[in-house]
Each structure stands twice: as structure tokens, then as C-alpha cells.
Amino acid sequence: MLRAAFQSSIRPAVVVAVSAVIATGAGAAMVIANTRPETATVQRVVDGDTIDVLIGGKPFRVRLLNVDAPETVDPARDVECLGPEASAWMKERLPSGTTVRLERDVETTDRYGRELAAVFIGDSMINAELARAGLAEAVVVGDNDRFYPPVAQALEEARIAQRGLFDTTTDCAPLTQIKDIEAAASALSEPADGATLAALSGYSAAVGLLVSRAADVDYRTHLNDPSVAILSAIDRSRMRDRIRDLRADLEARADEARSAVKVESERLAEEARRAAEEARLAEEARKAEEARLAEEARLAEEARKAEEARRAAEQRQDAERRASERGSSSQGAAKPKASSGSGSSSKGSPDTGSPDYSGDMKNYTGCRAYAPGGKTWHPIPCP
């Protein structure tokens, strides 16, 4: 699982002897480089594998050899699984003011100018303790493998004890997250036939969330963070296959859910359209009925008024007829007898206002009394 066997086979612990320069001949001497311990005072913990110290009163940043803890402060990377826990462990183990011993390897600084060392408190190597807690991976960078064997052995102890990154209950570990997503996917029941749009939408959203989680875990399985790097190549391959299959299944379910939501949405939209059309037609029918009733009322009112006008006309004609009859009766009773003397004319005298019936009646311009209907008339005295 780990790289201990491989690394040990090519760089055993005794490789420290490589750092010795052996000279022969005159003035021959053996100089052991980079192995002299230094005493330092801890200023602060930067993260799980980096600390600031004072050496001879001067500040230095020290990167622990042969371990790689999850990142927490790299601005170019997200906080990695158990990174905060690794930093917290270091802060508890190396509080400010702690006196430590630094032991070097072949390369004493890295490309960032940090000091490279194993950190000891007495006989206890902090590098190995961090790995034994399951909070860092065992690594070899460049030629510095002096402390790799004890770190790798400590990490194996963490694997057996299932501590830290090996803990199957660690929420942020990819394997744990894959199990959680699989369990959630199994518990997520598909909506029954005839499910409401709300139910379909809720299911689609839940599947979409699992797809997003699976994609995130899939991405992490291809990063070299400690939670993945601690696994063997075979285990990493199996984990990637597992999350790939899970992701494909979830994406297929998500496609089906989105399709179901679309179909139901379109069905409801069509129902709403039909309902709106029916409402529109009903409103038009209502307005047409109102217009018909209004027209009927208008015609009835006109008929009523016409009938009232007709009756009023009849009443006026009847009144005129009665008045005419009364006038004719009075005129007949008061008409004087014609005088036989003095040769008076038969025509009515202008002084008495009597009608003149002689001559052509078409030219009569005096007062008239019309019979009912207004078609015939006869002359009457003008009042």
C-alpha cells in the first residue's frame, strides 16, 4: 500500500552515508555533511508540516522532512481533508517556546528557502508522530530520504489502527464520501407515476446535488492530496472506477428527472393554456349575452316609448274630435236664419265670423274640424 518497501529498497536508512565525502591520499579525511543537530525554539506553527523557529536568535521557517500534511494555508489550493486537524495537532504538540532539535539530510533547504529538517523533542521525532496520527503522508523529495523509513512505518501503524486519513468515518475522506453518496443514492426513491411537479422537481434537485458531490469527489481522486496519496495505486484506481460508475449512474438519473420535470411542466402549461382559453371564451360569451340582453332592453324601451307616443296621439286626436263635435253642435244651435229682405248675400258676414260655404271648398282657408283619423274635415267657425 505504501511506498516504504520501494523506497527502502533503493534508499535504505543507511543512505545517510551518501552525505559523507571520503577522500584518500595526503590529508585524507571523512567529513559528514548536513547531519549536525541544531537546537531551535518554536515561534509558531504555520500548518501541519511547517513551523517557524529561532536558531541562534535568528528566525527560520522549517519544513518537516518526509511528511506531507493536508494543506490549509496555500492560497492556490483549497483546504484539504484533515488539514485543520493536522495544524491543530502540531500546535498542541509544539506550542510557542518549545525547544526542539533539528536534524538535517542531504539537502538542507528547498526552492522556497525553507529549512528542511526532522524535528525532535528528546528522542521523539515529530515527523513520525504526525504520520502515526494519520495526519500526513510519507514522502521523499529529492535525495532527502534519511527519515523516510520511520515515517513510513508510523504511517503503516496509522493505517492498521485506522487513524486520521485512514479512519473510515472521516467525513472528508474520498472513500467515506463515496460511501455516503452511494447510501444517499440508494435511499433516494424515484417519484411514482403521476407525481406532482413539486415532487418531481424535489427529486431532480436531490439527484443534482448528488451529481455535484460525486463530481467533486471524482475531481479530488485525481489530486495528489494526502487523503488520496496514502492509498496504493490499486486502491486509487478502484476508487476512481467506483466514483466514475456512481457518477455515471447519478447523471443518468438526473437526466431522467430533468426530462420528467420538463414533461410535467409542459403538461401543466398546456392545461393552464386551455383553462385560460376556456376562461376567455366564457368571458366573451358572458359579454355577448350581456350585450344581447342590453339590446333587448333597449328595443323594449323604444317599443314602450313608441306605444306611449301612439296612445298620447290617440288621446290628442280623441280630444280634438270631441272638441270639434262640441263646436259643431254649438255652431248649429246658434246659427241665425237668413234674412229675406234687403237682398243680403248668402255668404257669411265677415262681421259675424260665420263660415262661407259657397264656392270651391278647396280654396277654403277658414277653421276646420277634422274627423278621427285626420282624413276628412268640415269647416267650423273660428273662435
Image (cartoon, rainbow, N blue to C red):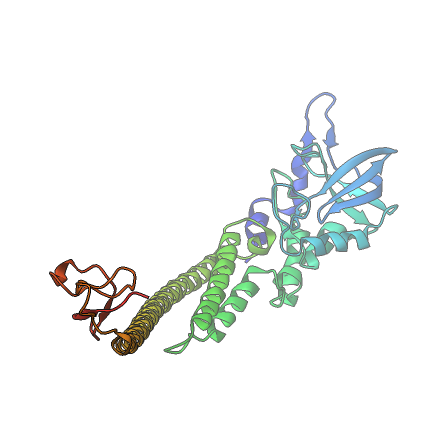
User: Left or right: 104 with respect to 188?
Assistant: right
Instruction: Tally the numbered discs.
Output: 0
At a point 19% along the width and 67% down the height, the residue shown is 341
**253 and 284: which one is in front?**
284
Q: Which of the two residues, 30 or 287, is positioned nearer the viewer here?
A: 287
In which quadrant is the C terminus drawn?
bottom left
Q: Position of residue 329 (x, y in %)?
A: 27, 79
Image quarter of residue 193: bottom left
Q: Quadrant of the N terminus?
A: bottom right
Pinpoint residue 215: horizontal percent, then vertical percent.
48, 56
Residue farthest toward the front in the current orientation of the protein: 342
Q: Is residue 155 above or below residue 111?
A: below
Asked whether 308 or 72 is in front, the reply is: 308
Nearest to the observer: residue 27 or residue 108: 108
Give the residue at the far left of this rendering.
360
Residue 293, by quadrant, is bottom left
Horizontal arrangement in the rendering, residue 335 relative to residue 190 (left or right): left
Residue 293 appears anywhere in the view: no
For the point 52% across and 60% down, the residue is: 213
Q: Position of residue 14 (x, y in %)?
A: 66, 44
- Residue at (20% x, 74% y) in the render: 371
Residue 95 is at least partly visible in this image: yes
Single out the residue that lies furthest toward the top: 26
Q: Percent x, y for residue 92?
A: 81, 55
**Above or below, comparing residue 73 to residue 112 in the picture:** below
